[in-house]
Amino acid sequence: MAKASPIIELKNIGVQFSQKEQLIDAVKDVSLTVNKGDVYGIIGYSGAGKSTLVRVINLLQRPTVGAVTVNHKQMLKLTPKQLRDERKNIGMIFQHFNLLNSRTVYGNVDFPLMDSQLSAAQRQQKVNKLLDLVGLSDKAQNYPSQLSGGQKQRVAIARALANDPEILISDEATSALDPETTTEILNLLGYLNQSLGITIVIITHEMDAIKQICNRVAVMDQGKLIEEGSLLKIFGHPQQALTQKFVDSSTQLGPALQEIKKSHILPENSKHLIELNFLGDVTEEPMVVELYKRFKVEANILFSNIEQLQGTTVGIMLLALSGQDEDIQAALQYLNHLQVNVKQVNLAQIEVG
C-alpha cells in the first residue's frame, strides 16, 4: 500500500480578531494534515472556526501564529506573485455561489481564464469541457438568475476547476440546497475526486454530508480541533460528546431515545437499556438470538440503524435487556468479546424537546 502523501499541512494555527477592543480567538492551536486524494471533512456548528481555518489554507485569512504548507511550499514565505500563482491551484466553492450575475454560465466559467496563456479557441474548448463535466452544456448561454440553486452550484464548481487545481475547498457549499440537490452535488464532488484525483476539503455542519463522501473527518468546537480520524473511526467510535451528537443526528438515535422516553415503551422488566455500536463482520452475527440461547437474556430491539460506509457495514442498536443480573453481565462480556462497543443508556439524562 502506497504511503499517504501530505498535500496540506497546518501546524499550530491560531487566528485572532480584534473586536470592540477585545481579542477574539477564532482558531486556537489547530494542527491537521490532509493527504493527497483525501476527501477531508471539517464539521462543527456556526462559530466553531472551521471556515476561518480553511481560509488559512490559501491565506485568504493569514494566521496570527502557525505554519501553512501546501504542496510542500511554505505559504507564509511566498512573495505576493508566488502566492497568486499558488492560489490558482486551490479552487473554492461557497454556500452562496458567488457568481457574476451580469455574465452567462459560459462567461462565469471563462472568467478565471481571462489572464491565462490560453488562446481563445483553447479557452472555449476548456469551458465547454468543464460545463459538460458538471452536466450544464445546455445552460451555457443562460444567466445565473435563470438557474436553480443546484445548477448555480454546478457553475461554481466548474469555475473553481478552470485552472486545473489539485485542491478544491467546499465551504458550506450545500447548506443552501434541498436534500436531493445536496446529494447530487456531493455525488458530483465524489466523482471529481475519483476521476480527477483532486483533493477536496469540505466544511459543513451536517454529518450526512460528511458520511456521504469523506474518508477523514475533523470535528471543531469553539476554535479548537477536538477530534480527528478516519470516517469509520469517527462514526463507529466517537470519543467526544459533540462528535457523538453529530453522529446521533445522522443515525436518528437522538430522536429515537426521546421517543422511547416520552412514550414509556421500555418493557417494565428491563434491567438495562444499552446502545451497541459495531463495525464490519460482527453485523452478520445473530447477536440478539445468541444472547437468549447462551445466557437466557431477552433482548428487545427498540432501535436499529445499519448502513454501508466506505464499503464497511456500520451499525447502531438500542436493546432493552431482561434477565438475571449475572446472566446480563455475562451477556455484556460476550458482546465486548465480539468487539461491539457497549454503552449503558440512562433515560433520565435524555432531554425531551
Image (cartoon, rainbow, N blue to C red):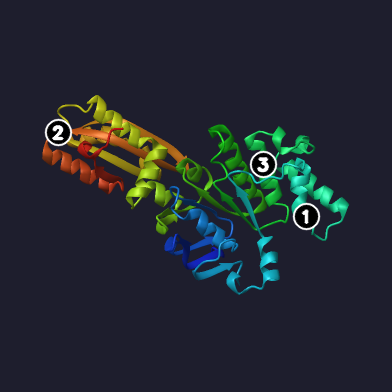
Residue placed under numbered mark 3 in the picture: 154
> Along the line of sight, which residue is nearer the eye, 241 or 230?
241
For mark 1, does the 10 Å Cα neighbourhood hold few (<14), some (14 to 19), or many (20 or more) residues?
many
Q: Label for residue 225? A: none
Q: Secondary structure at mark 1?
A: helix
Report the Cα–Cα distance between label 2 and label 3: 57 Å
Classify residue 278 as left or right of residue 135.
left
Q: Earlier in the sequence, mark 1 or mark 3?
A: 1
Do the residues under discs 2 and 3 have CB atoms within 8 angstroms?
no
Report the Cα–Cα distance between label 2 and label 1: 71 Å
| Image quadrant in which you'd find residue 254 | top left
Q: Secondary structure at mark 2?
A: loop
Disc 1 marks which amino acid? Leu
Residue placed under numbered mark 1 in the picture: 113
Please name the residue shown 17% across and 31% down the image. Answer: 270
Residue placed under numbered mark 2 in the picture: 323
Q: Secondary structure at mark 3?
A: helix
Q: Residue 121 location, x and y as percent?
A: 87, 51
> Along the line of sight, which residue is nearer the eye, 238 or 177?
177
Quadrant containing the N terminus is: bottom right
For mark 3, does the 10 Å Cα neighbourhood hold few (<14), some (14 to 19), or many (20 or more) residues?
many
Disc 3 marks which amino acid? Arg
